[in-house]
Amino acid sequence: MPSQDALLLAVWNWLNRMRDRNPRRLAVLLVVTGVVLAVLGWYFRPWLHGVVYGLYTTPIALPVVVLGLVVLAFLRPRLGTPGAAQVALVLAGFMLFVGIGGAGLLAGEELGKTTMTRSDTAGNLSETDPAKPRVVPQSVATRYASNTLNFPQYRIAGGDITVRNGTPYWSYALAPDGTFNHLTKRQHGTVLVDMTEQNAEVDTVVGDLQKGIGPAFYNNYRFETLKRADYLVQYQDPYMVVHEGEQYIAVPYTKPEFHWLPLPYTTPEWGGVVLLDRDGTVEDLSPAEARDHPALSGQKLYPFDLTRRKVAATKYRNGIVNTFTSHEDEIEVAPVPGEGNSQPFLVFTGAGPEYVVAVEPYGQAQGLKEVWTIDARTGEYERYSPTASLFGARKATDYVRQAARTTDWNRFTPSEPIPVVVDSQLYWQVRIVPEDSSGIAYTAFVNARSSDVHEVTTTAEVTAFLRGERVDGGGGDGQPGDRTPTLVVERVAPNGTVVGTLEIYDDETVRVRQGNATATNATNATTGPSSG
């Protein structure tokens, strides 16, 4: 089988023979070939987007190419064409590698310092909306959606948060399943999982979308978006919107902002939102237009990835050199447990939907350095720096493990520790889920100051806690809620540390049973309300 070089040489020799025998025919052939390639390239330009956008947002490449050509022209009389070309190529490659690395650091510093400058300092965090609790984590919602799916030709795709009639849902697309269906069918609808209910509350909206998520390119939303909307932007993950019975696909996007000194580089900024309706009509909306669009009322609009990237870039607040030397005041986005999901988390507060990002000090420290809140509709940044020592998300899961000693941690795992604010106190809301994400065992609220763990098992109890009805006193640091317990039982470790509390109210009783006793021979002690 001939090599690639042999084929290129054969083509080159054939073109030379054509030029000598019939130059006019060769010219016509080249023109026709160029036109055909241009037409195909224009039609299939969505497939070329990654390469084109990558070159467009890497302006350092242009001066490197110019430098390589200058070196080639200078060395050609001395080394000959092959030798000069090799030297120029190696030098250009090295300069491109160094230039991209340096431009990346400059872009991170610019993005981080701009984020710090444009953000406001918050004196407190917004109270969590108890009417819109984030109960179901993404991994469990995905399992709920799959378990209730009864369309043999389709599968669920995606997984993002949407709002329907004021209630937040996990949304999934009904995408064609299998090669044949992928080529012949369209997106068949939307699967919605109520994230405010612990049990599986799944609703399926059926109806084919002309341009949807999952089918082949000629029926695909992304191919259509890159042809009808702005091309030189970066589109984020899509999510489904159901408004007045109609289905839409919303796609936030970022656009590059160019900087030329000391090296050319780009930083991302929010560009807007593309909205596709059921008929495949594409609307390219600016941020202000997206906020005013009736189908996007109450929806998150700001790009998820841009939020994380900007907050993470604030580690350069004291400059690039600091991040490689003393690490003074440097931060990092806290890693959190939870299959298939990471910060930022979208929470619903009295001020509306907000992205929340908890950051820790750089290194081994696990305390809470800052909490960033980003308005999911306007993109306005605020940072809250606690005045007291608070622990972060990772430590919160450790306290849950310590408090729940009877939980088999080989079969269950803490998931998605989300910061929530109740009566001006910060808690970490941790869901305990089985390894297969088949449901929610219970929810634990961990006081970020006192480490008190309050476990609840039902949606009603989650809502009650968020309303402040059962807020722990936090070892004297906080205030009780609307109901005052008549008895508080503390679990105390051998070293004297309180690892958990149980509040007993006047309409409840306590039953104490030996751990190795059976239901029939257990020694029980039951007490009613107590005044002491």
Image (spheres, rainbow, N blue to C red):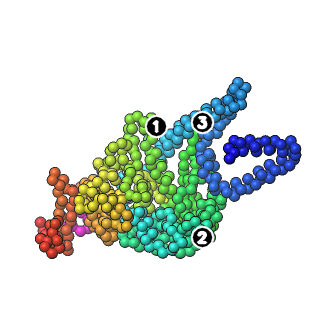
Residue 244 in view (yes/no): no
Instruction: Name the residue: 47% across, 63% down.
Output: 160
- Secondary structure under tag 3 reads helix
Residue at x 42%, y 54% (from the top left corner): 343
Task: Name the residue type under label 1.
Answer: Ile
Disc nearer the start of the sequence (2/1): 2
In percent of the image, x 87 and y 44: which residue is there? Answer: 21
- Which residue occupies 60% across, 36% down? 93
Front: mark 2 or 1: 2
Q: Residue furthest front?
A: 1
Nearest the camera: 4 or 64? 4
Q: Is residue 288 left or right of residue 518?
A: right
* Residue marked by disc 2: 185
Q: Which residues are magenta?
A: 480-485
State left or right for residue 282 relative to residue 343. Answer: right
Q: Of helix, strand and loop, which one carries label 2?
A: loop
Mark 3 crowd level (few <14, some 14–19, many ≥20, 10 Å Cα)? some
Which disc, if any, is residue 320? Answer: 1
Residue 317 horizontal/vertical position (percent): 44, 41
Dominant SS of magenta comes to loop
Instruction: Look at the numbered discs 2 and 1 and tell me whether their residues touch, using CB distance below 8 Å.
Output: no
Residue denoted by label 3: 93
Q: CA distance from mark 1 to mark 3?
A: 24 Å
Q: Position of residue 196 (x, y in %)?
A: 39, 69
Q: Quadrant of the C terminus?
A: bottom left
Q: Nearer the viewer, mark 1 or mark 3?
A: 3
499 magenta-colored: no
Q: Residues within 10 Å of mark 1 (few under 14, many from 20)?
A: some
Separation (CA) of disc 2 from disc 3: 45 Å
Q: Amino acid at mark 3?
A: Gly
Q: Which labelled disc corresponds to residue 485?
A: none
